Amino acid sequence: EPKTNMMHQWAQGSEAAAIAKLGEMFEAAGGTWEQTAISGHTSNTLAKLRSDVVAGNAPAAVQLKGPEIAEWNATGATANLDATAAEQGWDDVVAPELLTVMKPTGNWVAAPMNIHRVNWLYSSREILDDLGIDVPKTWAEFNAACDQIVAAGKTCIAHGAADWSDTTTFDSVVYGMDQDLYRKAFQEADLEALRSQGMIDAFAQLRKMIGYMDDGINGRSWEESMTMTMTGEAAFFLMGDWTVASANLAGFSEDTDYYCTQTPVDWGGNGFILNSDSVVFFKQNDPDYVEGQKLLAEIIMSPEFQATFNVAKGSIPARTDVDLSVGGFTKCQQQGLEDLKASVSEGSLVRSMAHNMTVLQKYRGAMMEVITEFVADDSISPEEAANQLADAVELQM
Amino acid sequence: MSSLTIKDLRKSYGEVEVLTDINLEADSGEFIALVGPSGCGKSTLLSIIAGLESVTSGEVKIEDRLVNNDAPKDRDIAMVFQSYALYPTMTVRENMTFGMECRNIPKAEQKDTVARVADLLQIGPLLDRKPSQLSGGQRQRVAMGRALVRDPKLFLFDEPLSNLDAKLRIEMRSEIKKLHNRVGKTTVYVTHDQVEAMTLASRIAVMFKGVLQQYDTPKEIYERPRNKFVAGFMGSPTMNFLNAKVVQSDAGFGVTIDGGDGTILPLPADHTANLAAGQSVIFGVRPEHFNPVHAHRGDTSARMKVLVDMVEPTGAETILMTTVAGQDVVASVEPDDAPKEGETIELAINMSKVCLFDPSTELRLSA
Amino acid sequence: MSSLTIKDLRKSYGEVEVLTDINLEADSGEFIALVGPSGCGKSTLLSIIAGLESVTSGEVKIEDRLVNNDAPKDRDIAMVFQSYALYPTMTVRENMTFGMECRNIPKAEQKDTVARVADLLQIGPLLDRKPSQLSGGQRQRVAMGRALVRDPKLFLFDEPLSNLDAKLRIEMRSEIKKLHNRVGKTTVYVTHDQVEAMTLASRIAVMFKGVLQQYDTPKEIYERPRNKFVAGFMGSPTMNFLNAKVVQSDAGFGVTIDGGDGTILPLPADHTANLAAGQSVIFGVRPEHFNPVHAHRGDTSARMKVLVDMVEPTGAETILMTTVAGQDVVASVEPDDAPKEGETIELAINMSKVCLFDPSTELRLSA
Amino acid sequence: MQAHTPNSQTSQASLGQRLANLTPQMVLAPTIFLAFAYVVGFSIWTIWISLSTSTLLPDPTYQGFEEYAKLWGSKRWTVAYQNLFVFGALYVVGSLAAGTVLAVLIDQRVKFEAVWRTIYLYPLAISFIVTGTVWRWIFHPNTGVERALHDMGWLAAKFDWITDRDLALYVVVITGMWHASGFAMALILAGLRSVDGDLVKAAQIDGASMPRIYRKVVLPTIWPIFIAVTVVLLQFAIKTYDLVVALTQGGPGVATTVPAIVVYDLMFQRGQIAQGAAAAVMILVALAFVLVPYALWSAWQSRKEGARHG
Amino acid sequence: MADTSTHEQFDPLATGGMRRRITSKGIVYGALSVFALIYIAPLLIILLNTLRPLEDIVRTGFIALPDAETMTLRYWGEAWGSFCIGGTCEGVSRFYKNSLLMTIPATILSTMIGLLNGYILSKWRFRYDGLIFGLITLGVFMPQQMTLLPWAFVLGKLGLSNTIAGLVFVHTVQGISFTTLFCRNYFVSIPDDLIKAARIDGAGFWRIFRRIILPLSPPIVIVTVIWQFTGIWNEFLFGTVFTSGGNQPITSAIVAFSGSGTGERHYNIEAAAVIMAALPPLFIYIAGGKYFVRGLTQGAVK
Ligand SMILES: Nc1ncnc2c1ncn2[C@@H]1O[C@H](COP(=O)(O)OP(=O)(O)OP(=O)(O)O)[C@@H](O)[C@H]1O
Ligand SMILES: Nc1ncnc2c1ncn2[C@@H]1O[C@H](COP(=O)(O)OP(=O)(O)OP(=O)(O)O)[C@@H](O)[C@H]1O
Ligand SMILES: [Mg+2]
Ligand SMILES: [Mg+2]
């Protein structure tokens, strides 16, 4: 009889509901479902995971992502899902950009649940319409729009400062200004790229954008920032697609309250910064749990779950063969999928550094420290910031 | 001029009256001892003089100035506490200068004063120590030093020696006496040790249950106590009290011990005022006024046969615990005179020193 | 039979030797007092006897059984502590029965024993109180009660009276004496009050710095102290020590006070063994062996002119602080004989009671 | 009290007797074992890990002091370490000061003493998480005091310390003080109560004013209490984690990061267990800055004590 | 009745000293009240926000009085019984039991062991006793983050992972440091003579503990119980890491509110849950505060 215990950090709200759905499906398929929702910060989840592994009872399934998957794979603690994957033909349906993440050494060890887009720009319809501004396409347009908005006495950018949200914004800035730089600096942690003039320019743009924010950014939650934009208090909000789920849940809707577009890019074309939630499976001794892993993986990869889960989460399915025109996907989500496809074909798709999809945690942590300090401290110049960024990464090598 | 006057003083804590109608005065330069058993109100009275407690009614005057409402610091007094109350975190020197600092006395003068007092008390070498590094006697001396730097109108002592051991107590007692002779300040000294009061004071105030029992010179108090309480409280071992009857014979008045063999103990002529034959009295004799009868010492007419229960040699004198007619009698005799336990001996009584008390009022009869 | 024997006992704490070569024995039923100044090792010795401390070397025997390695409970002793050490959470009764419970004595017997002891000590009405509800004297009595319920071979007391005030101390002293007379158990009694030791003990062990100075009867110790320390420690006010020289004249040996007027104080014949003319000695006289010279008392050949510095009446006797040849002399005289301060008077010395000490060894000279 | 140490001449003590004498040690043995394992074992393990190549999971391969170098090269850590000392000092001194003021006020024979005392003491019962959360609400300009003042019409009002990187640490200090000063108050108050009343009387007669009496006589007398409170508070300061996480999450930037947060992040968020262990070792070193002087002090104290009894 | 001048002077209110005393009393009470306000404010703010609907909180911030019309107690009910935490919609009620199951045994165990240790370390001297005491006390200072992995290993080896028993074990061992420290310092003030007397009476190690030491312990037991209870109850890291799902203590659930989850923050429910989670320690402090203060000074000052 298949059993499982899934460890995740979606303790509340729509995410918790989405996970609950997974449980229901698991039980409907005859399994015994248990979950361990770790509250609060990601480090709590990771602390628990490490403790469990050290204690010798690794959880059957854990919500984990990005290079962490490869790292855990390297410790030899992960289970091999190749058989199930072959049976179900995962290689054919999963978005190609995710394959290297889910199969770090060629074997399937994780099942992706979704694809998040990080580089969304939410604009307040009220403000843009009032001032007669078009949604900016490039950073220059963006800055010009902001100047106009600020002059009109509004806040241009809604933001809640935290290392991850500061970095999310910076992801979009670097990517939008120079996608090669992004790849070199944030996917390969190339020191020269980190120190380059392009990075300095990106920091200068970020500094400019901080100027467009109000004074209350510190300690503000991202939901509050979102509400500021939705209610017309601020013009723009740079954030991932989970915003869509929250905004819709809070009763705001696209086109009436807000527009969703990709964040500005200076190189034209479609851009997509990808983030993905996935479930990693750890080796189990109890055959019930082994069986449960197989069942859980199948359910996660099932189009039905992918649809339900992603409707709730604001993201798009990790399977490219799910039809978004049915089942309650929003316009923004549908647009997301289109952009994803276009981006893949243009070769502009990247993974998100801010959301732990590229470099090892130690490099990401070091970079986030520098970026969030830059946001908090006006006295740091873009040149200094770029150097610090490179130094911090170099230190961890 | 009277240095301290207390008039009709009362003090109550809520319902409880702890001092009743105290009247007391001290002449300039006098050494007054307040004695009495624990809880009789001695410390309370002293605190009232110091201004640390308020009065309920009555007057306190220092050098004829009414000070009832003055703060302690405005009364020009100095006080030594039983616990010494030395400031534990200050050195001896700082302890002594603290009061002067509070009164903004110039540093140079402070220094001189400390030097003078330290000299007087021979505590010069201790000046830089903390109180915790001093022995009991040294602490006592420092406490006095702290009082002496003030040059006040009135010195107050609250059982300053009771924390010292017997030998040191005797030593310090002499020192206080010497110091008082030298400094000559009016002093009020609380103690519950009657020997201290006797040796130090020019006048003793004996208190009991908040009431002043007698206020007089040590000699008067010891020899002519106003009542049985004072008689019993002053003197150690305590005065013997025997139930007796007054008899009148040809030789004059005498007493017989109740239940005894009827021997008449003749009273000196000057003890017989206010007496009537057949009257019940309490017959009080101090232990040292007994003496074993010795053939060679000549005869005393007042003798008493006693059974010796216990003999306690203390060195200089020997205490006999005896019984006569079922009543306990303690006698103090010379060691060489000491009988054996269980013996029956005859004790001679120095009848010129005995006291008679009224059994009901407990006041001393006879002048 | 000897009830307690201590042989060649030593005790060190680390480097520090606190007891050196103690030899002591107590006969059955004896009352032994251990006296000495604070820190001399009295309590340590008592703890060793009780088995609360281990010995470093030497033997402790109780009724001739070596008990060095026995636990306290197996030594059949009872002990009374200075702090009384009453179990604060138990009633008086429970305090008394605790030891019996530990030894599994039947309830009925416990009850009888408590009743008997309570009767003996008159603490029947207190049995259901907690120690905190008792006065000092009552606590003391309960502490003794707890010891008495045991019927042990040996009673140990560690300064049982030192927390009581003067009057109560004298009372309880008598009670302990009575009790010992009645119960007749061998007792070791630690005190630093020499009067207590004198009045209670059949033999006194005087200790100083961990060394037993003298072990003898009270009379011997008082009259024939082995050395200057013992002479000075026993007696209050303390013995006077004067630097003097031995002179030989027709009348026999005598002493002259150094720096004095050369008057020869003749020594009784039985004091002159081991003396040589011209020898320096310390001349020791107890205060009570001085007496003012009275015409009518006949002549004493040993007289000394002294200047009276201070007169301290204590009631039964009066203390004179005097100086002779620059040395302090304290005399204790009858109140009626007391001179005035500042007078120069002649004191007669009872030469049969004086002691001479060797200035270097401080041992008593003469037999 | 001395367990019998059987000595050579007289070692006839029975086996039972000797076993009875060993009871205390035997009863204590499990604790000694646990304490040893916990304090010494865990510390040694941490030190060892800090010198290893551990990343995601503990890994015994020896590497040397590299992780320490990396740690000290990181700005976040240096800020955190510095914060530990600044925060620790201000928090302890501030709590002591506030506690002293409260204790002295309550000592003025006030009515309803128990009520006042409870009011000041209750924060100790509140967890750091809750304390941090509530004070964040209060301090944050969008939700707290500033907002309330704005809503009351005082638009110029500004109270945004929590978002100011130079002032945010003081917000943590104030919040910590709120939590701990009642504890200091309680101990100091009890200390004041134990001061000999005669001391105050003596000082009154000496002519000292009430503030002076407290400053010069009473408070110095109870300094051992201040030491005791300090030790307990320092222990809180060094372990501070939840409070900061809930209050500022270490921000703005890294302005209020404390070492415990860095340790936790390195060990668990970033999978740099070795470096996290190195940071933990550095916390222990910080602890030594405090404990070694304290241990020396108490050793000196007890020696003095012993000397006085001797 | 004051017909003489002397009498008038005894009217205490007429004296300068008394007037001064009255004004200074005023200052004292004034200062006490100001402080009291600061200390109470946070509690009051949480309390008030439990009664306010979310819109109200979002509109006016946390520092505002509840609107009489929209004021409601229903968030208490939601927080207690129906709010979703960790995928289960039973509010905090189901964590309450875990917290009690963890806190009570750990408190009792660590207190009892502390009492024994304190007794041994204060009343029985043996070699290295000072060192052992120092070692045990050092445990007080160990940062939790550092001990997480070693504990995980130990719990795994003992088969106590993911169990409340494991938490009890961890908290007990950690608590021993504090309880031993407190108890030893308290017992030091019990006169050694009592122990000596008992030994002479024939009492052994255990009997002395039971009959002499334990009856004298209530003040320090109250202190350690309060200290341990609140400490263990409020701790969240171990609870979060060493247990999961239905075994977690209430603090882990509370952290779920304050953590950076996505979705709306239900401040009102959060506030109600926070108060509910804080009630047991609060109650213990209010009920036992007097004894806490008394025992603590006896125990901690030495
Ligand atoms: N603040 C107070 N409130 C109520 N009663 C008090 C107060 N202070 C003292 N008393 C009572 O007043 C009486 C006298 O106390 P006081 O301290 O003056 O006695 P004492 O003669 O100095 O005794 P001792 O010799 O023990 O020092 C005692 O019965 C005491 O209980
Ligand atoms: N446990 C110990 N360790 C080291 N020295 C000790 C110890 N116990 C006692 N001493 C020392 O041994 C000496 C004798 O102490 P003891 O208590 O026997 O003196 P005492 O004669 O009873 O004094 P007191 O009259 O003050 O009670 C003292 O100097 C004391 O400091
Ligand atoms: Mg008094
Ligand atoms: Mg002793």
Image (spheres, coloured by chain):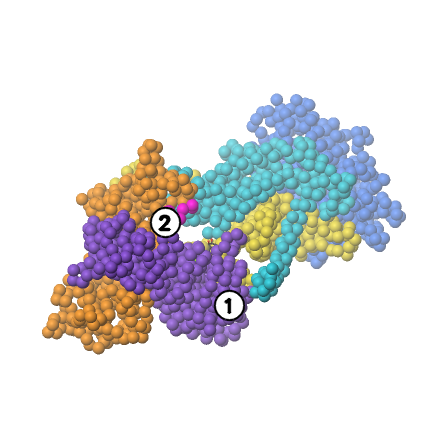
Chain colours: A blue, B purple, C orange, D yellow, E cyan
Tell me: is circle 1 under 8 Å from ligand 1: no
Q: Which residues are magenta?
A: C132-140
Report the magenta stretch's main SS: helix
The amino acid sitting under disc 2 is Gly
Residue placed under numbered mark 1 in the picture? B61
The quarter of the picture where residue C65 lies is top left
Label 1 packing within 10 angstroms: few (<14), some (14-19), many (20+): some
Answer above or below: position of E50 versus B59.
above
Answer above or below: position of B275 versus A4.
below
Answer above or below: position of C290 versus B254.
below
Answer above or below: position of C64 versus D228.
above
Pinpoint residue B101: horizontal percent, then vertical percent.
Answer: 52, 70
The amino acid sitting under disc 1 is Lys
Q: Secondary structure at mark 2?
A: helix
Q: Secondary structure at mark 1?
A: strand
Q: Residue at x 36, y 59 (%)?
A: B364
Q: Residue at x 22, y 65 (%)?
A: C289
Residue placed under numbered mark 2 in the picture? C137
Residue at the limit of the structure toward the left, as seen here: C250
Q: Is residue A24 magenta?
A: no
Report how far apart the C-alphas of labels 2 and 1 lie in the structure.
40 Å
Does any portion of residue C78 appear in the rendered image? yes
- Judged left or right of residue E299, residue E37 is right
Q: Residue at x 27, y 60 (%)?
A: B252
- Judged left or right of residue D16, residue A197 is right
- Judged left or right of residue C216, residue A28 is right
Q: Is residue C137 magenta?
A: yes
The quarter of the picture where residue A237 lies is top right
Pinpoint residue C259: horizontal percent, then vertical percent.
Answer: 23, 76
- Judged left or right of residue A86, residue E169 is left
The quarter of the picture where residue C230 lies is bottom left
Question: Which chain letter matches label 2?
Answer: C
